[in-house]
Each structure stands twice: as structure tokens, then as C-alpha cells.
Amino acid sequence: MKRTKMIEARKRSRLTQEVIAERMNVSVAQVSRWENGKDGIPSQRLASMSQAYGAPIGELLDENSEFLAPGPTLFIKGSVQAGHFVEAWEIHEDEWERYTGRADVAVPLRRRFGLRVIGESMNEIYPPGTILDCIAREPFDDIPNGKRVIVQRRRMGDGIETTVKEYFCDADGVEWLVPRSRNPAFQAPFRCDQPGDDIETIEIIALVVASIQPE
């Protein structure tokens, strides 16, 4: 298979690299590298690439798996209760499990880690056993509405608890954390600035960039 099939498909549709780049939200230089085989194509880009070129992936790549950039090997470093808080999500390094992370996340590997979902209080999105591919949040990182986040709160004199929830910022600038559960007991959102009387601090410590669900 020759990567020129991408160029041929683009020319058949009378598209320029600039149009492809705009549709895929990447640089023209990146499109050129993909078309000429200089860069592997992350698997997460295949759907948007097909749409951008207006052609099935099979017409762009004959042996596409050969050219896909593999994601990095990362580690599941703990578990998180979806929808409500539980203590101590981290596990000992000797018990970390390997998994393949999302390939197109442009942050240092030191910021990346995995968590395994336990419980059913976020089961609209993450069934028990789902691996969450996460990046540690740094100060001033923007969080788009609808993004799933890892939240940590510190109880007064009673340790640290974590959970995963969906983030939403309303028109007044108030930040909310929302569970996505079929269980009515776990459906109430709460404000980040009103964590509770016995809570010392509440903080969004990581963003979920991908999930790997059990069969």
C-alpha cells in the first residue's frame, strides 16, 4: 500500500491540503506528513480523516493498521468510584496494570495515568471495569463543558476522597459536577464552590481523555 492513495483521494474530490487541515483541525504540515508516510496516523483520527477526505478509510489506506501510530504504554494506578466519593484511589506501584493510552494526546507522559471504574453510579457512560485514560490537570487548564473529570475532596481531619463526574460551567460562571447514573440516588449535581460543611477543599485533579470499556 502506498500512502499516495490519500493524495489521489483528495485530488479526486478536488480538495487542497488546506481544506483537509481545516476539517481535521490540524496543520497543513501535519496533513502532508500523513499523506507522504512520514507520520503514523493515530487510530482516533481515522473517523475524522474519512469525513475530511470524503472517502472510506479503506480507500485511503489498504493496510491501515501498519501505519497507525500506537498509543503509549501507560499504567492503571488505582480505582475510582463513579458518581460518588470514596477514599484512596491509588494502589501500590507493584500492582499497576499496563494499558495502551490514546495516541494523539500531546502532554508529557508523566501527566498520564489510568484509573479503573468501580461501582455503578456513573453507569450511563462508564460501566464497572471501564479504564479511564486520564491526564493530570495543571493550573489554568481549561475544562470544556461536558468533559468528564477526576475530582478530589479533602474532609476535615478525615482523609482524601475521589470520584469521576461530568463538568459543567453555567452562564453565571458557576462550576457544577454532574453524575451520569440511571440510579436516582446518584443523579444530583453539586456546585464546586459548595462542597459541604465537613469538606475542607474540593479540586479537579485530572481530565478523562478516553475510556476503554470491558467486553
Image: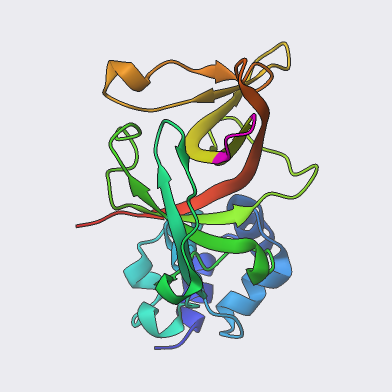
x then y, percent, for residue 42: 50, 69
Q: Residue at x 49, y 62 (%)?
A: 45
Q: Farthest residue toward the right?
A: 140
Nearest the camera: 19 or 169? 169
210 vs 159: above or below: below
22 vs 127: above or below: below
Residues in magenta, as a range: 156-160
x then y, percent, for residue 210: 46, 53
Specify the color scheme: rainbow
192 vs 36: above or below: above
Describe residue 31's horizontal placement relative to residue 64 as left or right: right
Q: Residue at x 49, y 48 (%)?
A: 88
Q: Quadrant of residue 142?
A: top right
Q: Quadrant of the C terminus?
A: bottom left
Nearest the camera: 60 or 121? 121
| Residue 97 seen in the current view | no
Q: Was residue 69 drawn as part of the magenta stretch in this picture?
A: no
How many numbered markers are drawn?
Answer: 0
Describe residue 115's horizontal placement relative to residue 22 as left or right: left
Q: Farthest residue toward the left?
A: 215
x then y, percent, for residue 144: 63, 35
Q: Quadrant of residue 134?
A: bottom right
| Residue 73 seen in the current view | yes
